């Protein structure tokens, strides 16, 4: 028999992982498959809502670079996850 405490703990861990963009099915995992290591060092997953992927970029230079590559990046991401409709880049803090 399962304890309620263990079930609630497992559900909360899964919910937090999906919310923060970690795990094999999270949009953050899609980015790791579509970007190079150098590019990944300059971005941070922000949100995935209604097919729109929000990503923080650490500088205006990288924001410009990602916007130039947006069409190609969308194609690569759609191969991994067909539910992605658009990517929105914003300058933000990368930790």
Image (cartoon, rainbow, N blue to C red):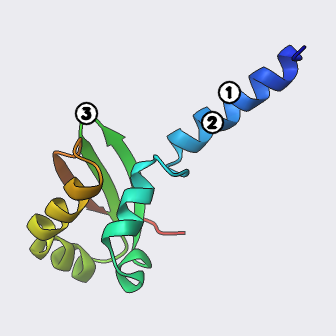
Instruction: Report the disc number at residue 50.
Output: 3
| Image-quadrant location for residue 95 | bottom right
In terms of image quadrants, where is residue 64? bottom left
Q: Nearer the viewer, residue 26 or 47?
A: 26
Q: Which mark is residue 14?
A: 2
Quadrant location of residue 74? bottom left
Cβ–Cβ below 8 Å for labels 3 and 1? no
Q: Nearer the viewer, residue 33 or 47?
A: 33
**Spot occupied by residue 43 in the image (x, y as percentages of width and height):** 39, 70
Q: What's the mark number on residue 48?
A: none
Quarter of the image that includes the N terminus: top right
**Which residue carries the number 1 mark?**
11
How dense is the environment of label 2, judged by Cα within 10 Å: few (below 14), some, or many (20 and up)? few
Q: CA distance from mark 3 to mark 2?
A: 20 Å
Q: Is residue 93 left or right of residue 69?
A: right
Residue at figure coordinates x 44%, y 58% from the top left? 29
Q: Position of residue 8 (x, y in %)?
A: 76, 22
In the picture as drawn, the residue positioned furthest to the bottom comes out as 38
| Residues tagged 1 and 2 counted as in contact (Cβ below 8 A) | yes
Where in the figure is residue 38, as x and y percent of width and height? Answer: 39, 86
Vertical arrangement, residue 22 with respect to residue 16, above or below? below
Asked whether residue 11 is in view, the answer is: yes
Q: Is residue 88 visible?
A: no
Secondary element at tag 2: helix
Determine whether label 3 and label 2 are within 8 Å by CB.
Answer: no
Residue 25, position as x, y percentages in the image: 46, 46
Image position of 66 with respect to 61: above or below: above
């Amino acid at each position: 028999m399962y304890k309620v405490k263990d079930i609630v703990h497992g559900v909360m861990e899964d919910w937090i992982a999906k919310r923060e963009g970690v795990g094999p099915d999270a949009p953050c995992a899609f980015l790791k498959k579509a970007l190079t290591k150098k590019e990944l060092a300059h971005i941070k997953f922000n949100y995935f809502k209604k097919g729109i992927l929000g990503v923080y970029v650490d500088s205006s230079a990288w924001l410009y670079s990602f916007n130039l590559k947006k069409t190609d990046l969308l194609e690569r991401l759609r191969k991994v996850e067909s539910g992605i409709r658009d990517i929105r880049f914003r300058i933000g803090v990368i930790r």
